[in-house]
Amino acid sequence: MSRMSARRDLPDLPMAYRPRGGGIGGYLLQRAAPYLPPWLLAAGTGLASLPAHSLWANSAAASAGLTLASAALTATTWWAGKATTPQRRIHSTVTVGAATSWLTAAALAGPATGPLQGMFLIGGPALAVSWNIRQMLRTRPGHDGESGADSGGLLEKVGLAKTLVTGSTVAPNKATFQLQLPPGELTADDVAKAAPRLASALDVAPTAVRVHPDPDSHARAQVTIVPRDLLKTTTVWPGPSAPGGSVAEPVVVGVYEDGTPAVLYFPGDPKQARNAMHLLVMGMTGSGKSEAALVALGELVSRRDVVVWASDPAKADQTLGPLLPALDWAALDMPSTVAMIEAIASAIPERTKWLAKYGYKQWEPACAQVQADGSPGMPYLVCWFEEAAKTIRETDDDAFTGIAQEARSAGISLVVSLQRASGTQISTDTRASLGSSWCFGVRDDRDAGFALPDEALDAGAAPQSWRDKRPGYHYLAANGVPEALWATPARSYLTSRDHLEWAVTTFADVRATLDPVTAAAARQAAGSAFTDRTRHSLTPGASAAARPVESDRSVSDADADDELDDVEEFDGIDPEQPLAPAPAVMRFGTPDARPRRTVSTEEARQAMTDLLEEFEAAGMVEVGPKEFMDHCDRHGRTRGWVSGQVAALVLSGRLQETDRPGRYRIIPQDKRVLAGV
């Protein structure tokens, strides 16, 4: 079956989506075309009666032949209509019987004889209008009591005979159809099983057809068809979606195929009846899950009321490197990872007690604020475990079970990321407690079943069709995400190391610090593994430089004085003696040099735009952060800030990504205007 013939069995597209032409007359003709056939048939019947009367007037043989032909056509119509709805069968039979009976009488007696002329002038338009009404109601199902349009053919071919299309919605790249199944014969499960055959009949990808059962009736279902993959083009991370906002706000990690943001919700929300989230992240090597994790963590470190602990004992700082300065605790080896798990387990009851003390049933943004008695607030805690299979393998398959079952009530979200969440890799109890799934490409349908719920798989989710060929493609079956989107493909943003470093540096003053309750519990459980944990410098370009600190204890001026008092000697130098006069003074710059003026953020951004125009005028085709940095040092901006502005120019359409990392093609101004940017 060809694509065109298959689509004829589905409801017609709305007129707004059909091509127009020929001015006003063509438009009106196009609008009227679907309603003309009944009128043309009525007029044709009247015209046919004229030659018929001249040939067969007063002929006994013609009378017998026309009568038999009329009866045969009427009976044939009734017989042929058994596959359609009863209303359509009766309507068709009455129409054919009335038309052939009038033509027989008009051919024998003359169309203007007796009541025949009035019957034609009244009955013909009435029958034509009745079919026009059916045509109109066909695009507005339910108005005439019918189940909807007859949709045999294609649906019958894929095993859904007697199924009716009761409604449709058509967008430029998305069509949604409401199906009414024959009660007692088919169920929504049968529609889900037929989805691969429907995709084959329509000549689209397997993931382009998705089925959503009606929660109120097992005899109804919704089928969504997306013929073209709009996710093929990578979308650059536009930066934090809620900079300085609360972690309770959605964390945007990518886009669905229709452009809708793909979001994660970490804390719960009693108003929305949403629990806090524990997240299972799964995908084979090369599926893009680590890059997506960087985007999610980049979002988190820009929020004001969340602290992040992260572990990656397999790749150390290879993945988490650009985010290390923003992490309160980064466990990059197995001993510190084990200590982190113990600290989380110890912190859960203490955080729960604190929430109960101040009257909170669960964590909410107010928890992070100073409380009524002056006590410091408690930020939300996200514990992210990359390459968790190694952690589980070298500790215990139940390593996360206890904290997964208890942490949500303590304002803690657990994220476990691994390539394959089989029973040999992770405890089934732990997997059951990780109620949300973020599934990237996997090897086969069995692996897909480890990550996604049955509802998503039955609706058409097929991450095994991507494997590692489409990095960043994913399904989100998570708390707060509507079930209708669980089987809808999305693609995560892609971000650069420079952009992440910019976010880490820019929001350093926004991020929360660990609360005393959690810090005390972690210190007691993990000891020096926590108090001497490595913290990483915010110095631009030196994110790998580290310095050990005791983060739960800040150094005050008094502490600094005490440290000086403890020093007994300075290698023979008496600190009380005045400094000797300097033998010479070195001066930098010219004697009349003036202090450099501080450049505002807006002025620096304008300088970036001006530089791009200069590069374009000089005939440059491609640029990158390096070219801008050669000029922007004078504005006191770091490489991370410049990279963030380059990303903004990409989003605005002024630059376009190339196949080479860090290189962008300049889009001329005139092309942007023609494209409507």
Image (tube, rainbow, N blue to C red):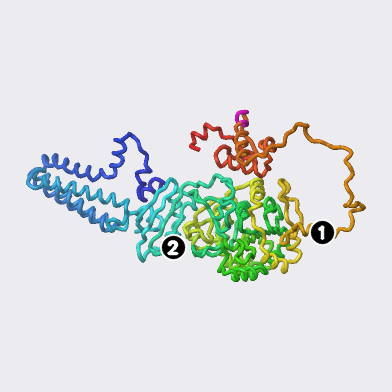
Q: Quadrant of residue 365?
A: bottom right
Name which residue lies at 41% across and 46% down.
2
Region of the chain picked out in magenta, as a range: 614-618
- The three-letter code of the residue at mark 2 reads Asp
Mark 1 burial class by Cα count in 10 Å: few <14, some 14-19, many 20+: few
In this orientation, which residue lies closer to the viewer: 539 or 97? 539
- The three-letter code of the residue at mark 1 reads Glu
In this orientation, which residue lies closer to the viewer: 84 or 620? 620
Q: Do residues under tags 2 and 1 come within 8 Å of each other at their CB atoms?
A: no
User: Where residue 195 sits: x, y (%)?
Assistant: 45, 56
Name which residue lies at 72% across and 46% down.
541
Magenta-span inclusion, residue 9: no
Point out which mark residue 189 bears. 2
Magenta-span inclusion, residue 616: yes
Q: Is residue 453 above or below residue 235?
A: below
User: Where residue 609 sits: x, y (%)?
Assistant: 60, 36
User: Where residue 140 sits: x, y (%)?
Assistant: 32, 52
Left or right: where 611 falls relative to 192: right
Task: Provide the secondary structure element on which disc 1 rests.
Answer: helix
Mark 2 burial class by Cα count in 10 Å: few <14, some 14-19, many 20+: some
Task: Provide the secondary structure element on which disc 2 rests.
Answer: helix
Q: Is residue 199 above or below residue 376?
A: above
User: Where residue 79 sits: x, y (%)?
Assistant: 25, 56
Residue at the spot of label 1: 563
Residue 201 seen anywhere in this rendered image of the structure = yes
Q: Quadrant of residue 18?
A: top left
Name which residue lies at 58% across and 65% down.
363
Left or right: where 224 falls relative to 246: left
Q: Earlier in the sequence, mark 2 or mark 1?
A: 2
Residue 430 seen anywhere in this rendered image of the structure = no
In this orientation, which residue lies closer to the viewer: 10 or 677? 677
Q: Which of pointers 2 and 1 indicates the residue nearer the eye? A: 1
